[in-house]
Image (cartoon, rainbow, N blue to C red):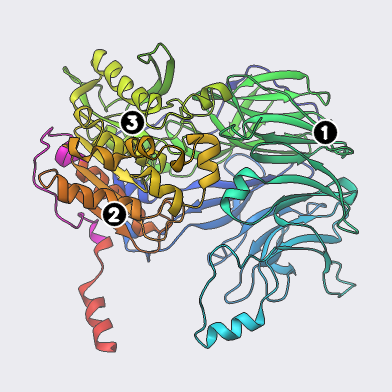
């Protein structure tokens, strides 16, 4: 691979990153039609980048409701992307064949099982390359010579169980009927037609990779496929591809994330936690593949490793997030730092490199994720989705640092109202991230559940705090919230509000709070224990009872290890007192509660408990509870997302913008875009067919 120049870079884009025709505020209808770059991969010779564009059906224009679909494109230069597949093919798991002649992808054709397909780069139709009978392929890897595809597939069908299900005997035994995924080697040579060879592997495999020359493989395994085990007990194993025997185990004690094999096969790069109590996998390690021994490269640093990729020259390119910003760092093969490069206004999310080309997926405060390629000292923008964003008038966005009541410096991302805050401050929304092992970056901050620029266009300020427990500031900062539910972590949010009020940005009497999951917990806490601080709250898939949460969610050990550090039965009363339902007597804040009824992470019962407690104990406090059928821990369907965004903004307009906590409830149905309302004629036709 050609030497890449990693020095302090200036940002160049083939399409200007600045809006060119600012004319109107952003709307929920705009949010519903956003597109972004998803997966990406660089061709072996570095001449092309294949990527997927991810989008939802535009229900605001009358398109049928649905989930995300992907479109495959290949680019050889800036603004020269070409679509390669029909509209009804939604590919996943894209890769280049080793010779670069085709792009392979995962796809399920009509009622068939998911298999590996390929489409020629030089033109031609797509074709099926490999699959497993009566099982979906979850992921795959090419051998270096292009003759073998290694497939991770679902467990073999239990035909007896299928027969019983059809007869009505479909009872499930909770957390017992696990079946492990299977690993296969499939020959893709046209001269040989043989069934894929199964490779026996231990445990429940969730991911794998193949070393150069197919010298060995690595698998990520856990004792069970339960989410809790995937977070607390997942480990990297180095295996013999012929026998499936384990050669070495990487005995990291904490969570694991991205793992990559070096070009010479001697090392792995592994992003992992430093101990069982580390909230997130953010520390970069090097692993000796012969022994499984490992060492940390950036332990103790106030940063988070996000993604890594080996270069052909044996160096390691890594995306590092430092607080709300990002940079590109390269390590030498011995683990020493070779260079660092600023990403400017870009927030780097993912990277891939091959043939002397390094590509990144990145966003900025003015656009979602796009494809960029490193060109000498510059990042050149190769894609430009959502051209209509040039019409939007954006609120100014920047990082903002304040001092909490105990002297801790805390950072976040501030979006000011379009035109700036008026005298006396603007109505302000505290938008709290989940986890809390996550962080907000100074990039694109508008989504169906994030008010962002939609709120800024309607006169709101929005602040996204990286409160204690957040990543991006080092392991010590991420651990500061542990054993202190709703303590320093949520006081940090109140202290952010007070700092913004003191600067004249926020109106203290018109500050609200919203968030999902752990951010939903913060929003429920803000509407109860901290009700005097917040004029309105929107809680999504949030926690209201820390005792029942342990028994109804799917991550009890995760909660114990990295959040509570104790079990409910260690101190029932203390666990009750950090639950919003315990503080309902203080609740004067109008709260909109929303939840997917298929959520296994935070059971919908958490929202039922808070809603019922409020209705009985505080009948004069406005409350509404909205359930989304079939939605898990976060809405996936276009209609559910659009509905959520409308309801959130309507709730804040009713109670936060006005500052009137006793205003009547808005109507039970939000005002949809005209095309999203459906057709009376269609309704009549449907009835006549019945």
Q: How packed is label 2: few (under 14 Cα within 10 Å), some, or many (20 or more)?
A: some
Rendering coords of residue 444 (x, y %): 44, 35
Q: Is residue 280 visible?
A: yes
Residue 374 as seen in the image, left or right of residue 195: left
Q: Which residue is identified by label 1?
A: 293
**Magenta part, dominant SS:** loop
Return the residue at label 2: 608
Image quadrant of residue 536? top left
Q: Nearer the viewer, residue 59 or 199?
A: 199
In the rendered structure, the answer to whether residue 532 lies left or right of residue 343 reads: left
The one nearer the camera, 589 or 538, is: 589
At 40% from the left edge and 11% from the top edge, which residue is drawn? 407
Is 218 displayed left or right of 93 in the figure? right
Mark 3, residue position: 394
Which residues, given as a range, are shown in magenta?
Answer: 652-675
- Residue at left 64%, top 40%? 77
Determine the CA span between mark 3 and mark 2: 37 Å
Which label sits in the foreground, 1 or 3? Answer: 1
Q: Position of residue 372 (x, y in %)?
A: 60, 35
Residue 670 on the magenta span: yes
Category of crowding for the residue at label 3, using alpha-carbon neighbours closer than 10 angstroms: few (below 14), some (14–19), many (at least 20) = many
Q: Secondary structure at mark 3?
A: loop
Residue 103 seen: no
């Amino acid at each position: 691979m050609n030497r890449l120049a990693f020095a302090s870079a200036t940002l160049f884009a083939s399409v200007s990153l600045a809006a060119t025709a600012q004319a109107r505020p952003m709307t929920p209808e705009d949010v519903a039609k956003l597109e972004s770059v998803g997966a990406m991969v660089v061709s072996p010779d570095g001449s092309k980048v294949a990527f997927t564009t991810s989008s939802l059906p535009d229900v605001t224009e009358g398109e049928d409701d649905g989930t995300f679909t992907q479109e495959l494109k290949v680019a050889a230069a800036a603004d020269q992307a070409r679509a390669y597949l029909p509209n009804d093919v939604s590919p996943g798991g894209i890769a280049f064949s080793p010779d670069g002649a085709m792009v392979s992808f995962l796809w399920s054709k009509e009622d068939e099982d998911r298999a590996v397909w390929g489409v020629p780069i030089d033109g031609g139709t797509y074709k099926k390359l490999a699959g497993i009978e009566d099982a979906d392929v979850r992921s795959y890897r090419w051998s270096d010579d292009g003759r073998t595809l290694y497939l991770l597939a679902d467990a073999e069908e239990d035909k007896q169980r299928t027969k019983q299900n059809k007869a009505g005997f479909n009872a499930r035994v909770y957390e017992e009927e696990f079946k492990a995924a299977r690993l296969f080697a499939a020959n893709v040579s046209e001269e040989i037609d043989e069934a894929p060879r199964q490779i026996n592997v231990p445990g429940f495999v969730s991911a794998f990779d193949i070393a150069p020359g197919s010298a060995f493989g690595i698998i990520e395994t856990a004792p069970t496929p339960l989410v809790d085990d995937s977070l607390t007990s997942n480990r990297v194993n180095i295996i013999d591809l012929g026998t499936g025997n384990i050669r070495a185990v990487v005995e990291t004690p904490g969570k694991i994330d991205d793992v990559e094999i070096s070009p010479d096969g001697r090392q792995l790069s592994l992003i992992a936690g430093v101990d069982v109590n580390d909230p997130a996998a953010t520390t970069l390690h090097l692993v000796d593949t012969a022994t499984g021994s490992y060492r940390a490269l950036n332990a103790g640093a106030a940063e988070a490793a996000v993604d890594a990729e080996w270069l052909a020259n044996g160096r390691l390119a890594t995306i590092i997030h430092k607080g709300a910003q990002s940079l590109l760092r390269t390590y030498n093969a011995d683990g020493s730092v070779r260079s660092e490069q600023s990403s400017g206004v870009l927030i780097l999310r993912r990277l891939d490199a091959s043939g002397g080309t390094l590509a990144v997926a990145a966003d900025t405060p003015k656009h979602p994720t796009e494809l960029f390629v490193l060109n000498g000292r510059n990042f050149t923008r190769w894609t430009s989705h959502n051209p209509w964003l040039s019409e939007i008038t954006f609120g100014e966005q920047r990082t903002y640092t304040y001092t909490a009541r105990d002297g801790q410096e805390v950072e976040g991302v501030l979006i000011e109202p379009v035109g700036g805050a008026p005298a006396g401050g603007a109505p302000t929304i505290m938008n709290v991230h989940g986890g809390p092992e996550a962080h907000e970056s100074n990039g694109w901050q508008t989504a169906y559940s994030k008010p962002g620029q939609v709120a800024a266009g309607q006169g709101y300020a929005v602040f996204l705090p990286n409160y204690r427990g957040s990543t991006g500031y080092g392991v010590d900062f991420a651990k500061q919230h542990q054993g202190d539910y709703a303590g320093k972590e949520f006081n940090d949010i109140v202290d952010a509000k007070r700092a913004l009020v003191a600067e004249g940005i926020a109106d203290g009497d018109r500050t609200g709070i919203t968030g999902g999951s752990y951010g939903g917990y913060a929003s429920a806490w803000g509407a109860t224990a901290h009700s005097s601080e917040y004029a309105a709250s929107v809680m999504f898939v949030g926690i209201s009872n820390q005792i029942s949460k342990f028994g109804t969610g799917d991550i009890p050990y995760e909660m114990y290890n990295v959040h509570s550090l104790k079990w409910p039965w260690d101190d029932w009363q203390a666990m009750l007192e950090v639950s919003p339902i315990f503080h309902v007597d203080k609740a004067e804040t109008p709260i909109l509660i929303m939840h997917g009824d298929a959520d296994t992470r935070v059971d919908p019962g958490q929202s039922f408990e808070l809603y019922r407690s409020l209705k009985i104990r505080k009948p004069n406090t406005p409350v509404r509870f909205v359930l989304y059928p079939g939605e898990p821990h976060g809405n996936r369907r276009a209609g559910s997302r659009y509905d959520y965004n409308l309801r959130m903004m309507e709730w804040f307009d009713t109670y936060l913008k006005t500052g009137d906590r006793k205003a009547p409830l808005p109507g039970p149905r939000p005002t949809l875009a005209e095309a999203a309302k459906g057709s009376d004629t269609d309704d009549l036709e449907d009835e006549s067919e019945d």
